[in-house]
Image: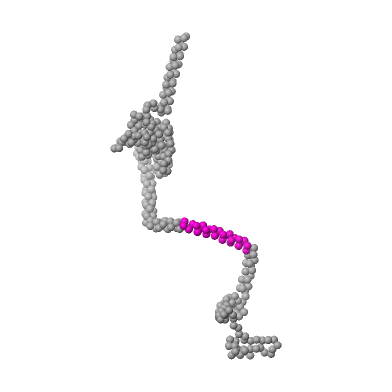
Amino acid sequence: MRGKTLGAAIKLIIFALVTIVATALLGVVVSNRTFGSTHTYKADFSDVTDLISGSDVRMAGVRVGTVGSIKSMSEDGNNFAQVSFTVDSDVPMTTTTQVKVQYLNLVGQRYLDLVETPGPDQTTQNPDDVIPETRTAPAVDLTALFNGFKPLFRALSPGDVNQFALEIIKTLQGEGGTVQDLLQQTASLTNTVAQRDAAIGQVIDNLLTVLSTVQKRDSGLSETISQLQRLVTGLAGDRDAISASLVNINDLATSTAKLLTGIRPVLPGDLRNLTALAKVLNDTKDDVNKKENALAAFLQREPAKLNRIIRTGSYGGYFNFWLCSLGITGLPAALEPSASESPSCPAVTQ
């Protein structure tokens, strides 16, 4: 009984040791840790999307290091990412080594790939020197790649694509159709794309025509821009005067509003009286010519009368008058001077 217990204990101990060793190895593999001596390098990238701390660093497909920290940096208005990574000390790193971000699998994991490109100025990479962006490359942007196929996808109708796919399936399954039918479908598909290519070519030709027209009007466009620049400069120079004029315009608007507020109560009555006055002036006839309007006749005769009055007052600040006739109630006859005494008086008719 005692022997069986000892044997079970030994088996348990062996199982525990194997489990611990396997777990430790699994932890080392998962954590991507290395136990040899390493060198730490830094590299600047324009884009390190989906690259995380702990990702692999590989050279020729062999894991030689681990990605450390990833920091966002900015210098002279330029934003970039700085990646710190370790490389085994026995792996040569030179000043011509390219550092690229690559896809590790379809899930989207990334890793750093070290690519050696020999050159005339090749020297050992100093760990204290940061690898510039000229020697780094981000991963391929799959979104931009697929967006590049959008014009092709738009040129294909869904029916053509479905028919093409159906013919491929039938040919591969051996259920019908021939390779010739498949080629005919492919030819039809390429012809459709070629027709769209002609339309694209026409668009490019039209764009060239527009650009040629703009080039011919280059001098006029430049002059227009220059005139606009001078106008804006002049307005900027007169901004103080413009600002002051706006204040004056505001004061004028305020005064006008107050004036209209004051005259508004009496304005309807004034308009009614003005209408009545205009009607009276229009209906009043001249005493001499009964068919002529009195105001019109007055305006026609008034300039001549004013000229005579001005001539009469040209001798000084007074007027000369001639007494041509005087009648007094109670006297048998009026006093009338003779023509020799008063040449300006009209002749008296007895």
Whether 123 is drawn above or below 257: the answer is above
Q: Nearer the viewer, residue 145 or 131?
A: 131
- In the rendered image, the residue lying farthest to the top is 1
Q: Position of residue 105 (x, y in %)?
A: 40, 32
Q: Position of residue 294 (x, y in %)?
A: 60, 76
Q: Position of residue 259 (x, y in %)?
A: 60, 62
Q: Nearer the viewer, residue 55 or 43?
A: 43
Whether 165 is drawn above or below 241: the answer is above
Name the dominant secondary structure of the magenta segment.
helix
Whether 309 is drawn above or below 172: the answer is below
Q: Is residue 253 magenta?
A: yes
Who's the residue at 38% across and 51% down the image?
A: 207
Quadrant housing residue 269: bottom right
Q: In the image, 293: left or right of 135?
A: right
Q: How is the image coloured?
A: one colour
Asked if residue 157 shows in the view, the reply is no
Q: Position of residue 33 (x, y in %)?
A: 40, 27
Magenta residue span: 236-263
Q: Nearer the viewer, residue 248 or 103?
A: 248
Q: In the image, 124: left or right of 51?
A: left
Whether 292 is drawn above or below 238: the answer is below
Q: Disc count in the image?
A: 0
Who's the residue at 37% across and 26% down the image?
A: 36
- In the rendered image, the residue lying farthest to the right is 330
Query: Which of the image's four quarters has the C terminus?
Result: bottom right
Asked if residue 319 shows in the view, the reply is yes
Q: In the image, 9: left or right of 296?
A: left
Q: Is residue 227 magenta?
A: no
Who's the residue at 49% across and 57% down the image?
A: 239
- In the rendered image, the residue lying farthest to the front is 316
